[in-house]
């Protein structure tokens, strides 16, 4: 049975690689996943470019596990030497855009869902979602489909983690800041230089240390990544300076607490673009984590964000592949990683079913 699941998973992944599915343009890969479920006799639903399905003997009175990964990709890295849309095997590797992030996870979770689809008398329901717009944290991705799923108790988010358990994940706030000054002629030393005012705040951002340090994620990290003034003339003192802060927050702070700290220390005005991508964690004594530990899996805090941040229930981020290969030229996944992924997911769920 597992050999058949592996073969069908690899074939499906090759079809997905061969089909462009940039964020917001995933309609064709959504069609492929829909057709695959039809061929497997699985009832499914579609919301936008998100595909979801429930196990055949779904029972509303039982708790529910979510299996989720995404089928959108970033644009191909300019360093590609291979055709990103031609799935090719070489030396045990499957090359192609989205093979590692997160195609291998996606098809491994689909295979796992199929393994349990017909089983009766299980302790949990199993719901699967292939989501869109993950790479851009889009509003028409997992958030669009979650209200359709009923109550979810906990879930597995498929991202390449080398099948180790990411039990915590940094939150992300992108913050637009504005330092206000007063324009004037540089030669006459007129005005108030907004750039200098911004530099004072930037220096604070560079040196500030948050008190709470996570055992899993370490310190919160602040970085200024963009800066510009309101004029391009060398002889004009800028009256306004805008800069952008990238804030990576550990699980010990919520976004409101972070903004209260900024209010105390920043002279510039600031406005978060979004507070959706929150830091998350799952307890080390959660049944999923305990099952993984029993399988010999390690756990860690992930510096990257995923759809995990948008789920209001405990989730474990875990999957075949290596995050270091994501978004790189000539992206690939080892075929053995897909087989290992299917086996690992099945063993993990069997321990709690």
Image (tube, rainbow, N blue to C red):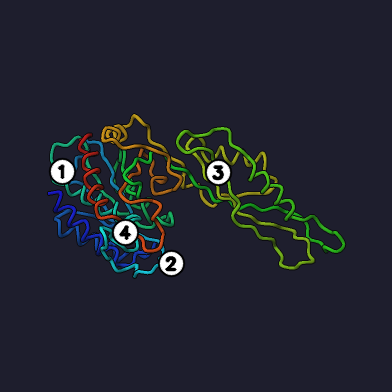
Q: Distance between the residues labelled 1 and 3?
A: 46 Å
Kindly check if marks 2 and 4 are in contact, taking CB atoms under 8 A apart as contact. Answer: no
Tag 2 secondary structure = loop
Toward the top, the furthest residue is: 285
Please give the label number shown on residue 79: 2
Kindly check if marks 3 and 4 are in contact, taking CB atoms under 8 A apart as contact. Answer: no
Kindly check if marks 4 and 1 are in contact, taking CB atoms under 8 A apart as contact. Answer: no
Front residue of this view, candidates 26 and 159: 159
Q: How crowded is mark 4: few (under 14 residues within 10 Å), some or many (20 or more)?
A: many
Q: Mark 4 points at which residue?
A: 99
Please give the label number shown on residue 20: none
Task: Compare marks 1 and 3 and give the one earlier in the sequence.
Answer: 1
Q: Is residue 314 left or right of residue 126?
A: right
Pinpoint residue 231: horizontal percent, then vertical percent.
71, 65
Q: Residues within 10 Å of mark 3 (few under 14, many from 20)?
A: some
Tag 4 secondary structure = helix
Q: How far apart are marks 2 and 4 (CA)?
A: 16 Å
Front residue of this view, candidates 190 and 208: 208
Position above or below: 248 against 181: above
Choose top left, top right, bottom left or bottom right for residue 42.
Answer: bottom left
The structure residue drawn at horizontal position 43% and vertical position 54%, both measured from the top left corner, is 137
Q: In this view, does 347 lie to the left or right of 49?
A: left
Pinpoint residue 64: horizontal percent, then vertical percent.
26, 39
The structure residue drawn at horizontal position 47% and vertical position 33%, both measured from the top left corner, is 215
Q: Mark 3 points at which residue?
A: 221
Q: Nearer the viewer, mark 4 or mark 1?
A: 4
Task: Compare marks 3 and 4 and give the one earlier in the sequence.
Answer: 4
Q: How crowded is mark 2: few (under 14 residues within 10 Å), some or many (20 or more)?
A: few
């Amino acid at each position: 049975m597992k050999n058949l699941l592996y073969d069908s998973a690899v074939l499906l992944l090759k079809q997905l690689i061969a089909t462009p599915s940039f964020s917001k343009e995933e309609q064709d890969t959504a069609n492929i996943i829909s057709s695959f479920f039809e061929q497997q006799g699985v009832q499914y639903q579609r919301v936008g470019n998100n595909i979801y399905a429930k196990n055949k003997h779904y029972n509303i009175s039982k708790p529910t596990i979510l299996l989720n990964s995404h089928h959108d990709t970033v644009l191909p890295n300019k360093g590609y030497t291979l055709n990103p849309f031609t799935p090719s095997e070489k030396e045990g590797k499957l090359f192609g855009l989205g093979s590692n992030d997160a195609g291998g996870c996606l098809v491994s979770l689909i295979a796992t869902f199929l393994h349990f689809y017909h089983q009766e008398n299980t302790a949990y329901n199993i719901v699967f979602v292939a989501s869109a717009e993950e790479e851009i944290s889009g509003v028409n991705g997992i958030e669009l489909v979650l209200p359709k799923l009923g109550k979810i108790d906990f879930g597995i988010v498929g991202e390449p983690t080398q099948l180790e358990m990411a039990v915590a994940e940094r939150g992300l706030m992108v913050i637009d800041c504005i330092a206000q000054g007063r324009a004037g002629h540089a030669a006459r030393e007129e005005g108030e230089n907004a750039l200098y005012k911004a530099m004072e705040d930037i220096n604070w951002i560079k040196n500030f240390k948050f008190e709470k340090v996570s055992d899993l994620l370490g310190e919160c990290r602040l970085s200024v990544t963009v800066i510009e003034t309101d004029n391009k003339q060398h002889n004009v003192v800028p009256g306004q300076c805008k800069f952008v802060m990238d804030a990576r927050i550990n699980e010990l702070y919520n976004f409101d607490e972070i903004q209260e700290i900024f209010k105390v220390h920043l002279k510039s005005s600031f406005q978060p673009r979004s507070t959706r991508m929150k830091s998350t964690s799952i307890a080390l004594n959660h049944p999923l984590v305990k099952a993984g530990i029993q399988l010999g899996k390690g756990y860690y805090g992930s510096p990257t964000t995923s759809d995990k941040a948008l789920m209001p229930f405990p989730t474990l981020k875990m999957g075949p592949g290596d995050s270091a290969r994501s978004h790189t030229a000539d992206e690939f996944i080892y075929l053995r990683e897909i087989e290992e992924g299917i086996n690992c997911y099945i063993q993990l769920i069997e321990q709690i079913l």
